[in-house]
Image (cartoon, rainbow, N blue to C red):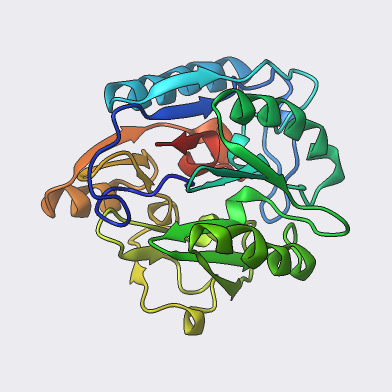
Amino acid sequence: MTWQEPSVLESEEPTVRTALVRRPSPRLGDGLVTHIDRTPVDADLAARQHEAYVAALESAGWRVRELPAADDLPDAVFVEDTVVVCGGLAVLARPGAPERRAEVESMEQAVAELGLEVARIDGEGTLDGGDVLQVGTTVYVGRSGRTNEDAICQLPRLLGTRGRHVVSVGLGGCLHLKTAMTVLPDGTLIGNPDCVDTSALPGLRVAPEPSGAHVVVLGEKQVLIAASAPRTAEQLRDEGYDVSVVDISEFEKMEGCVTCLSVLIP
């Protein structure tokens, strides 16, 4: 996620919160898969699941803005990978998969229209937004097959102007950092210690199931989680969180998770 929840960073709830999304391409099943076997995707079901995901964002008070359709770009629904938003700055990514770089142009237009300052990863740097997890003033960045050291070295210069400290985190056996871990509204990291170098972290709460590592913070006590993580959802409800559950089975077939389907901008 790219938004910083009030209990982690901001002193009060923002009055206008925007969620950027893009409807799935009918060619979703032709997208990239790296760490899992390819299985057939039901494009019609994916479209209905995406509508339910958008409805959950709206119910939590987010104003949803849809990016232009990109039916010829199978992975374009995973909008998080194209930008990192931090303190009024939008850092345009340079996806590690060359096939995905055409997705960035429409995101650039969207963040500019929202009045954000725009910067970009350049040169030989490659960065997927799914490798970036912001927790207070710390920005964890995964060293993955999609994000390289060149890009990670550019981030302190870009994000340092927003008072952020960048921490590089090693990964193994997963696509992105936020495949391995995310953050709860109180700042606690939750995830799968088998996929992430925990020595770079202050601590990591172990999620009961793999998709329990994927939490979207929607508000001070509001979170969004996939239907494939029922035990995690139950735990979070027991702790007093308002948990919205969405079925994203067709996106999970493409290594997607709830975090990568939106960019949240307070």
- Residue furthest front in the image: 161
Q: Is residue 28 above or below residue 1?
A: above
Q: Is residue 206 above or below residue 22?
A: below
Residue 90 lies in quadrant: top right
> Foreground: 215 or 151?
151
Coordinates of residue 206 in the picture (x, y in percent): 35, 69
> Foreground: 18 or 203?
18
Q: Is residue 254 visible?
A: no
Image-based side of 54 in relation to 70, left or right: left
Please state, as top left, top right, bottom left or bottom right, where the C terminus lies in the image. Answer: top left
Coordinates of residue 40 in the picture (x, y in percent): 67, 31
Image-based side of 128 in relation to 239, left or right: right
Residue positioned 62% across, 61% down in the render? 174
Q: Is residue 35 visible?
A: yes
Q: Is residue 179 above or below residue 254?
A: below
Coordinates of residue 170 in the picture (x, y in percent): 62, 75
Residue 99 lies in quadrant: top right
> Foreground: 180 or 138?
138
Q: Is residue 234 above or below residue 206?
A: above
Residue positioned 30% across, 62% down in the render? 187
Coordinates of residue 127 in the picture (x, y in percent): 72, 54
Residue positioned 43% across, 51% down in the render? 214
Residue 209 lies in quadrant: bottom left
